[in-house]
Amino acid sequence: MRERTLKLLFGFAMIGVFGAVTALAQAQDAQQQPGQQQSGQQQAGQQQAGQAGQAGQPKKNWKDQAEYDLFASITKETDNNKKLSLLDSWKQKYPSTDFKQERLQLYLTTYQGLGQPAKMIETAKEMLANDPKDLQALYWIAFLTPTMNNTSPEALDQAEKAGNGLLAAEKPPTTSETDWQKAKKDMEALGHKTLGWVAMQRKNNEQAEQEFTKSLQVNPNAGEVSYWLGTVILAEKKPERQSEALYHFARAASLPQSQGGLTDQGRSQIDSYFTKAYTNFHGKDDAGLSQLRATARQNAFPPADFKIRSSAELAVEKQNELQKQNPQLALWLNVKNELNGPNGEQYFNSTMKGAAVPKLKGYLVSQSPASRPTTLVLGIENQNTPEVTLKLDAPLAGKADPGTALEFEGIPQSFTKEPFMVTFDVEKSKISGWPAQAAPAPARRPVRKGAARRKG
């Protein structure tokens, strides 16, 4: 957008400058001695120069030949430092010239060539003092104030006026309707962008959002505007709009510079921030990140049904699914989450201790003693990680292999957070899944000798 706008606006500038050259030259011709014959072309030139006096404006004239010669030398000079020196000389020798605005235009383009944005803004303000509708001056103030990050109240007021001025700009008489429509579109995008930036600096986030949205609707390929739009949406602190903010950050991080995006360095910095923000909000999801970047690269605004689920929402979905598939594990994970929280001990003492807990399922980690145990250690979430200890009222028969699935009902009696362990009192009869022990073979009764002889 910037390059296209510059070409069109510089076109306006050149029309103004060369128009001034023509008018000045023609005005000089008009000062010939009485009786000197003029060509038809010169007479036509005088007529065109006289158009400067239309609409109640006086016709512009040189003070003398020396002023014209100085002006002509400025327009021919290609070295900006030398051109600036000539402009200063013109200003000193002819402070009240009829062509003050044209001189300021030349100052403006010269300062641009020298890379002096502060001087450009100062010159543009002078131009607006003479003509509040000057397109070049409006453009450069609207463009440079955010670029220079000048947030003083005076600068914000001036930028706001420039933004509104671009939105209300009228077609210059020398510009074709086709060129004007192209330029007007770019000026609208810049005008709304500048007004959004001003509102953002003033913490008027909702107004800034409206202006940035309008700017992107006119010119979708503007990575900086997408970044600012995400910033103000996030600043509105509405959790339900977090997805939108992340989308616009993804757009700013992914849109190539060749398509209106930021520089490689700028995109890299935003991408680092975006990746961290996305992970904090949604959780680590490389595939989701890749898909979001691809979608945002192609579209300036998210689809109507766009939503990134937060990690909290995903946890609820996971919990609901687990509740359906494995209610015992779901119950235990809720309990464990409470116990691992900052008020875990208080939760245990006030809610769990001495109260019957619904049936839970775990996996044998160890048993004591090794045979006919009275103490079992189980893992519930992970069969290899000890989480509960069961103190039995009577020994179980035989022994079981590690990993054996057991269900139990018991009364919690104690809890430690580090290492994590909940100890239950459990009745032997409330244990299920313990492997049945093979009944011992009946002892063989000895055969008496007398009985054997009698049988024989």
Image: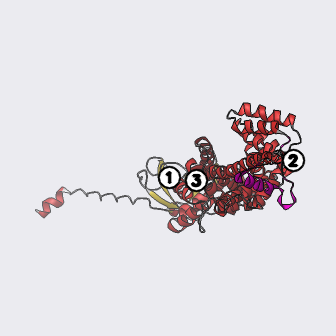
How far apart are the two marked residues, 2 and 3, measured between alpha carbons?
A: 44 Å
Position of residue 268 measured from the top left corner of the image (x, y, whole percent) = 59, 43
Q: Secondary structure at mark 3?
A: loop
Task: Inspect the magenta stretch and tell me whether residue 196 lies in it.
Answer: no
| Left or right of residue 174: residue 94 | right
Q: Is residue 69 visible to the viewer in this orientation of the structure?
A: yes
What residue type is disc 2 on? Answer: Glu
Q: Secondary structure at mark 2?
A: helix
Does label 1 or label 3 sit earlier along the sequence? 3
- Residue 283: mark: 3
Q: What stretch of residues is rendered in magenta? A: 37-63
Position of residue 14 measured from the top left corner of the image (x, y, whole percent) = 70, 48
How is the rendered protein coloured?
secondary structure
The residue singled out by tag 2 in the image is 154
Tell which of 279 and 293 is nearer to you.
293
Tell which of 382 and 226 is nearer to you.
226
What residue type is disc 3 on? Answer: Gly
User: Which residue is found at the position 60% from the left and 47% from the top?
Assistant: 271
